[in-house]
Structures are given as structure tokens and as C-alpha cells.
Image (cartoon, grey):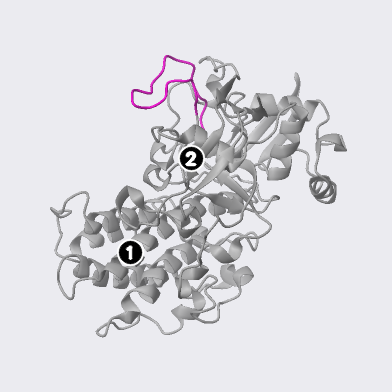
Amino acid sequence: MSTAEDLIHILHQAAGHENGGSESPDSLLHYYKRVRQQSLRLCNNLETEDYELQADVFVSPIKWHLAHTSWFFETFILKNMADYSVFHPQFEYLFNSYYNAVGQQYPRDKRGLMSRPTVQEVKAYRRHVDHKLLSLLSGDGPELTEQQQELLVLGLNHEQQHQELMLTDLKYCLSFNPLYPIYSQANFPEGQSPDQDGEYQLPKLEFIEFGGGIYNFGLKHKTSGIDFGFDNETPRHQNMVQDFRLANRLVTNQEYCAFIDAGGYQDPQHWLADGWAWVQQNNITGPLYWHTESQNNGQQRYEFRLTGYGKLHPNQPVTHISFYEANAYASWAGKRLPTEYEWEVASKKREIKGTFVESESFHPLQVISSTSEIKEPYPDDGMKQLFGDCWQWTQSTYSPYPGFKTPEGAVGEYNGKFMCNQMVLRGGSSAPPKDHVRSTYRNFFYPQDRWQFTGIRLAEDV
């Protein structure tokens, strides 16, 4: 069997669940199967050649993502069981990402050179790991300890992170192909296609005020159900926030075009020194994946999407921009970026809704002006796009919360050692699944990074 659908079938079959199983939707078994199946579904439209692409050191091939997420379960759970046989002794080295406590790692910049193991061997590796874990989760063998269950939940959230990376890494790699390959046919809702711009009214950009005070931030570290959180979201603590205002929606392509047309990339006054140097050294003139073509009636902007190359939609959120660009735009607009604490205050007690991977748009969508869709007990103040669509840059540096302690063992390397020289982003994007996003989630990237679906929400002082 070779296709992703074949492997999804095997996920059901491996532990005697030929018809998908009768386990509770809230069970760990169901959760495991659902997450593992999603990784394979993302590969349904890929050709073998697509699995091997690595256009730069910061992206990885699809094949590597599929193997590494299985490596995580094998390394931290299965290898500690007496009756487990490793699939291949060299896989610990080939598919270790950055866990120095586990051992040496194959050079990251050479992952795209690994034609072997083949795609089929990597899929066989997934089957091997799935068969063992599905058997254990189905009660065939020793019951997983509480610590092993926590590692399993961590591994599933880790795999959801890699599902997002599979899409964003592949998009970056495909963008170098002048044929502009289509990963998936567009599945835009009515009125959201670039050819239908202006059909739906865009809410006016307004600023909503939030009261200052002492708030609780973060969460207690639990690894089950909706209370799961990565270590960098802990511990729960208090912090003082001043009164502030936050924009009711994300900045759009059209609004960002005004910044470009006003000479924003040629005027250093709104740029941080590092950002201006980055613009000059890399000849940056606009967001990643944007292209300008000359036509009879002037210049027309286009962008490359996972759904193909097409005209820029003016009302969709601007995306694939760096922190430097987001900060410069905010300065040009007479505003600023929010802190991560301000963003979390605004997100409290709100429904998780927005454009996620389930939409199959594979791109952030326009917010539509309408009567409030948020029902009690959620706030009804006009705030849109807090979750999904684009990861929102904040002005907060990625550092540990007060009282943060790195967990013991190799898993302690998960987040803590990256708390330097990066910026915090909040809210999720159109690439991760909905149940992976929460108000306390802290994403982090270097200020020049823009291959993720990153965008802008403005803030201002009261």
C-alpha cells in the first residue's frame, strides 16, 4: 500500500478497528488516530517528488516531517518498553531534530539530500509505530502510565505543529518553481475568491478599548483535553497591563499596499535599525510571495498561494511578513504592535473561531461585516480574526514566564532553549487545526521570518 488513504485505512485496521472503531470521541485512542490521519490526508495530493523538497535550511521535506513525528513517539514512549523492537537503528540519528540529550542529529541543511529511506519506507515506519501504539491504546498490552500518556498527548500536539510546517514548508519550496504548482484546488467560501473582491463589505478598521489592571496569564501545565499547554505557556502568573486599544481586525492587503505605494520600503524613518539593514541587504520590497506585473492599465499585484498563483485579494489579511515589516507598518500607520499580554487580555473568554486548516482554503480569508456571530458568554464587541487566519506579531520578546522551570529530561529541550532573540506571535493561522489553538498559545519566530502565515493587528495607547 502506498497512498495516504491506504495508510489511514491501516490506522483503523491495525488495532482491530476495521470500521473506524467504536471508541469515544474523547478517548486518547480516538485523538491519536485523528491526529495521525490528518498528517496523511495533507499528503493526498502530493507526488513522490514533492516529498523530497528542501529549498532552505529553515524548512524540511515532507518526508522528514512524517518520519520525525513517528520518531518522537518511538523515542520517548516505545523505546522504553521491554518488548519493542526499533524499526531501523539509524532512524534515531536521521530523524532527531534538536534533542541533544537523545544523541547526534543528521545536519538540518541536508535533509533534502536523503533520497533513502524512501517515501514508502517512511510510511512503513509510520505503520510500525502506529501498530504498536494503537495496540497499547486499545488495551492489548500493558496500560500506558500517566507519564507515558502525557508524552503521547505532547507528541500529538507536536505532530499538529508539524502539520502546519508541512504546509508552510511545502509552500516555500513550491514557490521557487516557475510553474507555480498547485498543492490543492481552491476551496474559497462564496465571495472570498480573488476574482470576487469587493462583493462583501469589509468592517471599518476600529479600535476597541480594554481596561488595564492585574490579570492572570498562562495556564497550569496539564497534558489532557482542552487544558493541554506547552511548557512555555506556564506557569500561570499575574502581570499588570495598562489601558489599551486593539484593532477590531487584521490589516488587509489593500491597506498594506498603501504603505508600499507611499514608499514604506524606501523610507528608513519607520524601521528598526536591524529591520532597515535586513531590507537593504535582502532587497525586500513587499511581502513574501507577492509579485508585480505590468499590464495595459498599469501595475497589478499577484501572489502565490498553496491553491495557485493569482490576483491579490485586496480585503484578505496581509500575510507572510516579518516582524520588521509589521513593526514598520504599525509605525507608519501611527500605531504600534500589541504586547502578548494585551493580546491575551483581548482573547479571554472568546470562542475559538476563524480560518483554520479545516476550511481547506489554505490561506487567510477576508472578514465579513455582519451582525455579531458571537453568542453569550463570549464578548460581543466587534473583535474579529483573533484566532486563525494569521499568526499575529506582538512586540514581546520570547522569554520565560516568571517562575518558569525547564522540565527534566530530553523533553525539557522542547521550548526552553529557544527563549532568545525571537518574538512572540499569537492567535494561530489558516494552517494549523482548530483544536490546536488556544488563547495562551505562544508561538515564536525570529524577526526576519516570514514563511509562516504571519500578519498584523494594530494597537494603540489610551
Q: Earlier in the sequence, mark 1 or mark 2?
A: 1
Tell which of 36 and 271 is nearer to you. 271
**Residue 165: % across, % down:** 51, 54
Image point (81%, 32%), residue name: 264
Q: Identify which amino acid the numbered label 2 is placed on.
A: Ser
Quadrant housing residue 248: top right
Image point (47%, 59%), residue name: 231
Secondary structure category for the residue under label 2: loop
**Residue 261: % across, % down:** 79, 26
Q: Residues within 10 Å of mark 2 (few under 14, many from 20)?
A: many
- State which quarter of the image contains the C terminus: top right
- Asked if residue 369 is among those painted magenta in the image, a careful observer would answer yes
Measured along the vertical axis of the image, is residue 263 above or below residue 287?
above
Task: Name the magenta segment's main secondary structure.
Answer: loop
Image point (48%, 69%), residue name: 412
Kindly identify which numbered label has been placed on residue 150: 1
